[in-house]
Image (cartoon, grey):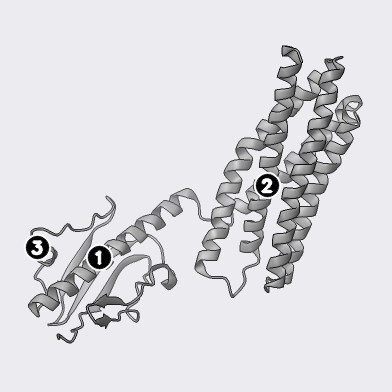
Amino acid sequence: MNNHTAKHFVLQLGSLISLYLSLAFFLVLSFGFINLLFPDSLDSLWQMESAAGSIRIGFAMVVVFFPTYLVLTRMVNQNRRQSKDNAYLGLTKWLIYLSLLVGGLVLLGDMVAIIIGFLEGELTMRYILKAVAVFAVTGAAFYYYIKDAQGYWLKREKQSLIYATAATIVIIATLIAAVVQIPNPAMVREMKVDNEVVSALQNIHWQIQDYYQQNQSLPENIDAAYGEFDRQPTFPETASYTYSVESDTTYKLCTTFNHDSNQLDHEYYPRMMGENVVDWRNNNWDFKAGEWCFERVVEETNQQ
C-alpha cells in the first residue's frame, strides 16, 4: 500500500469512527430526552439527573464528532471519485463492511437494553420511542453505507449531499429540543452553589450537635462550635449565612438560595454516636429560592 493509499485509508477509518461515536451518543442523548419528555412517577431524582446528564454528554459528543464525520466523509468521497487505485477501493469496502458488523452488534446491544427496560416495567411510550430511535438511526446509517459499498453515492454526489443535509437537520432539531429540557449552564452553576451551601450548613449542624453533647449548651457563635483546631467549611464566594440561638436547644441557620430545592436532594441518614443513633431525617434540608432559614433542635443522647 503506497503513502497516498494509506492516507485515504486513514481518512476512511477516521470517518467511520466519527460516525459510530456520533450515532452512539446521539442515541444516548435521545434516550435521555425521551426519559425527561415522558417522566415516570417511579423515577428517582437520581434517574432524572442521570437523564439530564445523558443529554449533556450526548450533546457535547455529537456537536464535536458529527461535523468531524461530515468533513472526513466529504474528503473520503472526493478522494474515491478521483482515485483509480483498486487496492484502496478494495480496502475501504472491507473497512465499511467490518465497521457495519461491529457497529451493528453494538447498536443491537442498545435494543437488548431497551427490551430489558420494558420487561422491568418501563413506560410503554418510552419503550416505543426508544425502539423507533434505534431503528431509525441504525437503519439510516446502514442504508447509506450498504449503498456506499456498492459505489452508489460515488455516481450520485447530489443525492449524497441531500442525504447528509437531511440527517444534519434531524440531528440539529433533536439537539435543540433535548437541550431545552435541561437547565441552562448558568442555572446549573447556581444549583451547584446551592448544594455547596447546604453541604456546608449540614457540616455546621453536626458540629453544633457535637458541641452541645460536650458542653450541654449551644455555642455563642460558629467559631466557638469549631474551636481552635477544627476547620470550618468553605462557602462559595457568592454565599453567606447567619447563625442565631433561639432557645436552650434550638437555633437557626439562615442563608439565601438561587433556586427551590427538591427535598430528596439533601436527604441524609442517621448518624451513629457510639451505641446511640441521632436521627434527624425528619429535619429535612428542603428550601425555597431567596432568603431561607433552617430551624434545628439539638438532641441529647444517653450517656453510658
- Residue 231, numbered label: none
**Position in image of residue 46 (x %, y %):** 50, 65
Q: Amino acid at mark 2?
A: Ala
The structure residue drawn at horizontal position 66% and vertical position 41%, both measured from the top left corner, is 21
Q: Which residue is mark 1?
A: 203
The structure residue drawn at horizontal position 59% and vertical position 52%, both measured from the top left corner, is 55
Q: Which residue is mark 3?
A: 227
**Position in image of residue 142 (x %, y %):** 83, 43
Q: Amino acid at mark 3?
A: Gly
How packed mark 2 is, by other alpha carbons closer than 10 Å (few <14, some 14-19, many 20 or more), is many
Q: Does residue 19 appear to the left or right of 256 in the view shown?
A: right
In this view, the residue in front, 29 or 14, is: 14
Q: Earlier in the sequence, mark 3 or mark 2?
A: 2
Is label 2 in contact with label 1 (beta carbons under 8 Å)?
no
How packed mark 3 is, by other alpha carbons closer than 10 Å (few <14, some 14-19, many 20 or more), is few
Q: Tell me the distance, in whole angstroms, between the alpha carbons under discs 3 and 1.
A: 14 Å
Element type at mark 2? helix
**Position in image of residue 3 (x %, y %):** 72, 12
**Position in image of residue 187 (x %, y %):** 45, 54
Q: Which residue is mark 2?
A: 24
Element type at mark 3? loop
In this view, the residue in front, 279 or 235, is: 279
